[in-house]
Amino acid sequence: MRKLLHFVLNRVFITAVLVLLQVAFFLLELSKWSSYYVLIAAILRLISIAVIIYLIYRPNNPAVKLAWIIPIMMFPLFGGILYLSCGHVIISRKLRDKIQTADKLMRKNMPENKDIQQKLQAENPMAANQSRYLTEYSGMTVWENTDTVYFPDGLSYWKKLLEDLETAENFIFLEYFILEEGTMWNDILKILEKKAKQGVEVRLIYDDFGTVLKLPKHYEQHIESKGIKCVAFNKLIPIMTVILNNRDHRKIVVIDGKVGYTGGVNLADEYINYKTVFGYWKDAGLRIEGEAVWNFTSMFLQMWNISRSTDEDYAQYRYNFNKLVDSKGYVQPYGDTPLDEETVGENVYLNMLGYAQKYFYAFTPYLVTDNEMCTALKLAAKRGVDVRIVTPGIPDKKTVYWLTQSSYQNLIEAGVKIYQFTPGFIHSKCVLCDDEVAAVGTINFDYRSFYHHFECGVFMYNTDAVLGLKEDMEETFAVSELITLEWCKKKFMKLNVIGPILKLFSPLF
């Protein structure tokens, strides 16, 4: 039943159904089979017109507006319904109030750290500008006294996570998009269950849609029976806007307020290559220890308070670092929400593109961007920045893979270097520039991450993890295929015929 539900709620399936309905209505008109056709068609067309007017006046990226307006005009009977189902964010007043309350509580407990901001300003004004942006628009401040460790694969991430979970004395918070029963999750769950019995407070948030094919029904009740507090975020109910768009795509672990984790790694066996699905699965993770963990603690509690309708005090979960952590540089974990008009995740990448003087490297599983991001990538390359992007060599979703590849030729002609990860699928979401600045987290170069999902990342300046990421990127370039214009020309049908058609529906992917 849940497999059927997952299929029925798929964006592409909904689009196909609505297109077929459009054809059916056209046939009805020709055959005069329905006396109600004129009335129903008029109502549907009015909805589409209203949606187009709304999009025109909405304060949003013009490229995103056009990406929706064109399909609506192509299918005026059901285009408006398609947008309301898959593109619009509808927030009830009750939910909006809960979000605002949780946000105020989070910001109230977040120190400004103006002295650290001033030190960063003196060292690097460009990095400081990025930090100020994040403080203002994500509510997350910048920190020193935080050690960073970069993991170039899911296996090393998982092994260190198991060690850290064993040390927990007070609380463990976990927030993931995907859980699946298997070696990885089962070993973690054993530790969580043991710690809960020892009196450690354990909380888990997982996305209900992300796990719909992975876990038994009502799995949160099973977890609660083990003494672990659990929330299945955004439960599957017949409201397509909420189901399809506003997913919790974040990956966060907080242990005693001292140690935090994030990255692309979910808790399923393919992420540690214990199960092979699309060749070698390459991912990335980040461990932080120190003051900056407070940002992750606050982000988790904000999501928990929204989900459980609580307003508990954050301060009880803040660790007091009496001793300095062996560290260097500046660390700023941040979050992004689809429930405002600020695309923090995308803007961090755009700011880094503007910052880059020597190079801009990126890992992403999907390259489905708006015109603004595409233009920024090309402009950086045209002004002499070495822009490199690594995408998968083996896809997990064929349609999105074709859509990703349809952007290659335009970017390559402007000087951007595109690599495909030959051994398999790259799921990492990392950006690095000029040996100084990096962002590691959950944010893909696609519409879902930029506009629809709850996401998180860590902005870093001059930390150990920055150099660790550079080493991994150089090793990844060496085992990846550099895509050429000749390669693109050989795939003319897919890239130049099918690709532009797919781009019309790119917000759906």
Image (cartoon, helix red, strand yellow):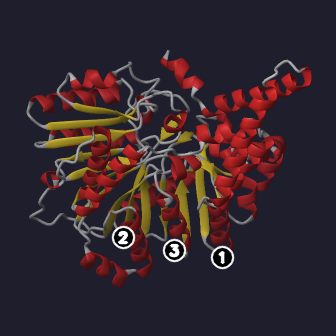
Q: Nearer the viewer, residue 119 or 490?
A: 119
Question: In the rendered picture of this protein, how many numbered marks are placed on residues?
Answer: 3
The amino acid beneath tag 1 is Arg
Say what secondary structure mark 3 lies in: helix
Circle on res. 335: none
The amino acid beneath tag 3 is Tyr
Residue 26, located in which quarter of the rendered image?
A: top right
User: How far apart are the two marked residues, 1 and 3, measured between alpha carbons?
Assistant: 12 Å
Disc 3 versus disc 2: nearer the observer: 3
User: How far apart are the two marked residues, 1 and 2, measured between alpha carbons?
Assistant: 24 Å
Say what secondary structure mark 1 lies in: loop
Q: Quadrant of the C terminus?
A: top right
Query: x, y (%) of residue 474?
Result: 51, 58
The amino acid beneath tag 2 is Asn
Taking the spot 46% from the left edge, 45% from the top edge, the residue there is 91
Q: First in sequence, mark 1 or 2: give its number.
A: 1
From where the camera sits, is residue 170 visible? yes
User: How far apart are the two marked residues, 3 and 2, measured between alpha carbons?
Assistant: 14 Å
